[in-house]
Amino acid sequence: MTSRNTRRRALIGGLASLGVTIGMITTGTAPAAHAATWPTPTSSQPVSATIPVSGTVDGGMKRYYGSGELAGDGQEEGQDPIFRLAAGATLKNVIIGAPGADGIHCEGNCTLQNVWWEDVGEDAATFRGGSTYTVTGGGAKKAADKVFQHNGPGTVNISNFAVSEFKTLYRSCGDCSTQYTRKVNLSNIEVTGTGTTARLVGINVNRGDVATLRGITILNDASRRVIPCQKYNNNTAVGTGPDSTNCLYSASDITYR
């Protein structure tokens, strides 16, 4: 049988390979509660017009930040993104600094690998038009509202990701002109609580949305202010907590430290 420590070392090793270092190994009776180690950018580049991405683009851990018409960092709807990914594109090893504008737009299926948002603008990333969107590694902080906005159909998979200083990690659009049944899968997520109410996922149960949560670690949240799964009927909150239909997780899937 694999020991708990062996499994933990394997998990941390896997996260480190994606740029996430989590200080969750404990010594004695005093547990460590450290957030992910954020990467140091290799250089910085202002972006005054949205950068189109096709195929695979490796940013080499450069920081990109908005300037000129992309210098917004508020919650106004309709802002342009720093990057716009064509269907099938992959963006990896990128840091998005402040101002962050509307982060990244995926116009179809996309992969975001080891992407870090230092100060989320309107949203970190918006998914539309595809069927499968993958976020692996990386992290986001300082999101006054949402981190990931799911406007299109399909499934968003988020794994080995760190989030702090946020209101909602994932939101299925509640008022898009065209609505869908959407799915989100969270796996190996490190969450740092800030003492205020925050939500990991917000889904529309009246649309049949499904959220699956596995391997969630929540730091600094003794008062349990972080809600794992918030249920909505479009934009009306209608409940929280696990069930067998829409919010698929159990108490063992959430670890508090």
Image: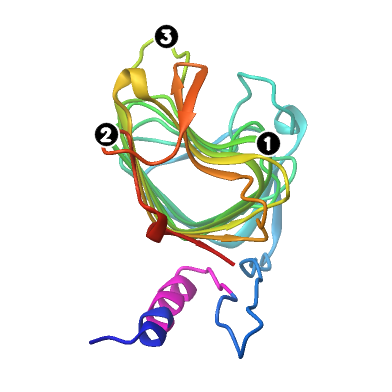
- Return the x and y of residue 123 as percentages of the image width and height: 59, 34
Q: From the viewer's side, name the closer residue of 98 and 224.
A: 224
Residue topped by disc 3: 177
- Return the x and y of residue 87 as percentages of the image width and height: 32, 35
Residue 31, quarter of the rendered image? bottom right
* Secondary structure, magenta segment, majority class: helix
Q: Which amino acid does label 3 sit on?
A: Ser
Count of numbered circles in the view: 3
- Return the x and y of residue 149 as percentages of the image width and height: 49, 32
- Residue 245 got which mark? 2
Q: From the viewer's side, name the closer residue of 222 and 76.
A: 222
In whole angstroms, how far apart are the C-alphas of marks 2 and 1? Answer: 33 Å
Q: State which mark lies toward you, 2 or 1.
A: 2
Residue found 65% across the figure and 71% down from its top: 33
Magenta span contains residue 158: no
Residue 180 visible, this angle = no
For label 2, the SS is loop
Residue topped by disc 1: 121
Q: Which contiguous range is marked in magenta?
A: 9-22
Q: Which amino acid does label 2 sit on?
A: Thr
Is 193 on the left or on the right of 58, as rendered? right
Q: Residues within 10 Å of mark 2 (few under 14, many from 20)?
A: few
For label 1, the SS is loop
Q: What residue type is labelled 1?
A: Gly
